[in-house]
Image (tube, helix red, strand yellow):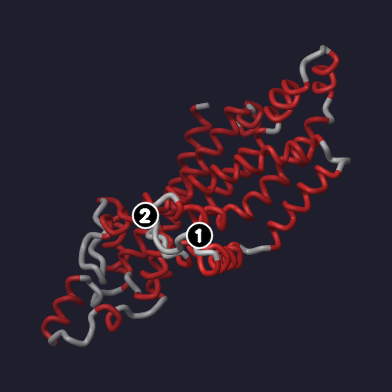
Amino acid sequence: MTDYLLRVAIKMAVTLFAIVTVTFVATRLSGNPIDTFLGEGLTDEGRDALIAYFQLDRSIWHQYVAYLRGVVSGEFGLSFIERRPVTQVVAARLWPSAQLLLASIGLTAAVSIPLGVLAALYRKSWIGSAVMVVAFSGYAVPNFVLAVVMILTFSYWLNWLPVVGNGTALHFIMPTIAMSGVLIAALTRFTRNAMLDVLGQDFIRTARAKGLPELAVVMRHGLGNAGVTVISVIGLQIASLAAAGSVVVETIFSWPGIGQLLVTAAIMRDYPVLQFGVIAVAVAVVLINAITDVAYALVDPRIRLARS
């Protein structure tokens, strides 16, 4: 197990270094930030002082070395726009994004896993067909379309739910549903397919022949052995939401999260905020993937032994 964890750690380090480098190059290719954030009211001396302070007059290689030095030391500089440390700017947005992410994943797991099990158990009846119709419909509706439809229906016409911000529990309803729609459809299908594969195995027939209750057969032996597939899909979904899945939804609902922050930073060419925001999201995604890999090994030791 120690060798397996070491391999996971090395893979994380290489991935993060590549992301840090690509992020630096991509932000520099987006354009010159000087005219965007310095404004028109500065004197020539003040303009030159800010350019020198942010090292925008130095070569790209010098900026890259300083950028790597800041990443290693934990000093990521000041925001071009807000003139305060980017760690404070991003930290203020992490918890709202985490709240929306946890709510979406919780709703996805609570809805899709039972639906997937039902679709597998009643695959030859109308129940299984109805579940799959709902699942395939979820693929056909993008999250931004679902978000706009819900805003028009529940906020504009019915005036039931608020749209902007995250002040109350009611603010979570529409963004959570918008982010969970496609995820529920995907996890339902994967859970159904995994359960169908497991329920046809010999050990399931043996468990039923021993007289075990059907609930124990389905939940303990069936869903327990289908757990690797379910964990893998949930891990991928969490990673996709953390990476980019919340950007559109947060922008539509003006959610004060990191997704909306990255969009604003990209438009305004706020390099330090954009770089640190992308690095923070990348670290979250890499950690989620690492936890998923370790969960594989814990659920099914054959994975750990095979990779050894």
| SS at badge 2 | loop
Amino acid under label 1?
Answer: Trp
Q: Is residue 188 left or right of residue 234?
A: right
| In the image: residue 216, left or right of residue 275 | right
Instruction: Check disc 1 and report the residue beneath it.
Output: 160
Left-right relation of 88 to 264: left
**Most foreground residue, 276 or 162:** 162
Identify which amino acid the numbered label 2 is placed on.
Answer: Gly
Residue 11 higher or lower than 264, as above or below: above
Give x and y (percent) for residue 242: 48, 53
At 64% from the left and 49% from the top, the residue drawn is 184
Which quarter of the picture shows residue 31? bottom left
Q: Residues within 10 Å of mark 2 (few under 14, many from 20)?
A: few
Q: Quadrant of the C terminus?
A: top right
Q: Residues within 10 Å of mark 1 (few under 14, many from 20)?
A: few
Residue linked to disc 2: 167
Rounded to the nearest whole Å, what is the CA distance between mark 2 and mark 1? Answer: 15 Å
SS at mark 1 in the image? loop
